[in-house]
Amino acid sequence: MASVKDFSVEEKLVALLRLQKIDSKLDEIQILKGELPMEVSDLEDEVHGLQSRQTRVEEELNGITEFIESKKTAIKESEALISKYEKQSENVKNNREFEAINKEIEMQQLEIKLAEKHIRDANEELADKVKALESAKKQLSVKEGVLNHKKGELQKIIADTEKEESHFAKDSDAARSRIDERLLYSYDRIRKSYRNGLAVVPVERDACGGCFNAIPPQRQSEIRLHKKIIVCENCGRILVDADLNDSVEVK
């Protein structure tokens, strides 16, 4: 088999044209998928964010609940101390002991009032967090529903086109192996320059098949000779004649 450099200009044009038609088939599959891959990716990010938010709110709820329980425990401890001090006050021997015990009782009563205030405030915060959690769950449920629907659509398209896409991807690799690096670089650069991905186009109705700029008769004659690679002076795409274009088919 001849090396890539040994191929004639016509063979190189055929290789480029074949690659273009294969890549156009792959482009059609991507168009069929449309924005679905990006939409699925964005929705997955949103769902992940909502899941993190839900987890965070649940952790905050647990923290508030634990705080309330700790304050309830503190109240019980203070009540137990008050009961203890009241019993001790029955056996005091002087006013100083009585006053000291009363101060301890008052201190524990203040501790109870403070703990009760903390519990009220925490319960208000708890109610807000419960609402936030419900909202997060609803949003998550909606987004998961949309995500599953979009994933289903994408998976169906992938299933329907997987065999065809794999076939053309292999053909694209094979076609690329028959084109020298410099020419391949130019082909890829031109393809990236245009949204339709057309780097090799036929002359149609005396005009470039890419930008529709008129091609002079002399230039068209040169294109038909296949002696050199000719590009459109207006858009820079590689030009081939209609006969050569029709002779190359991909399946």
Image (spheres, grey):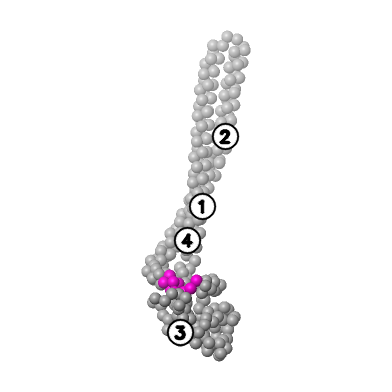
Q: Are marks 2 and 4 in contact (CB under 8 Å)?
A: no
Measure how far apart labels 4 and 1 are at the Cα level: 14 Å
Which amino acid, mark 4?
A: Val
Q: Disc 4 marks which residue?
A: 40
* Secondary element at tag 2: helix
Which amino acid, mark 1?
A: Gly
- Residue 82: image tag: none
Q: Nearer the viewer, residue 102 or 197?
A: 197
Q: Disc 1 marks which residue?
A: 49
Going from N to C along the chain, the mark reached first, 2 or 1, is 1
Q: Are marks 2 and 1 in contact (CB under 8 Å)?
A: no
- Residue 118: image tag: 2
Which numbered mark, 3 or 2, is in the foreground of this view? 3
Measure how far apart labels 3 and 1 are at the Cα level: 54 Å
- Residue 244: image tag: 3
Q: Nearer the viewer, residue 227 or 117?
A: 227
Which numbered mark, 2 or 1, is in the foreground of this view? 1
At 45% from the left and 72% from the top, the residue drawn is: 176
Going from N to C along the chain, the mark reached first, 3 or 4, is 4
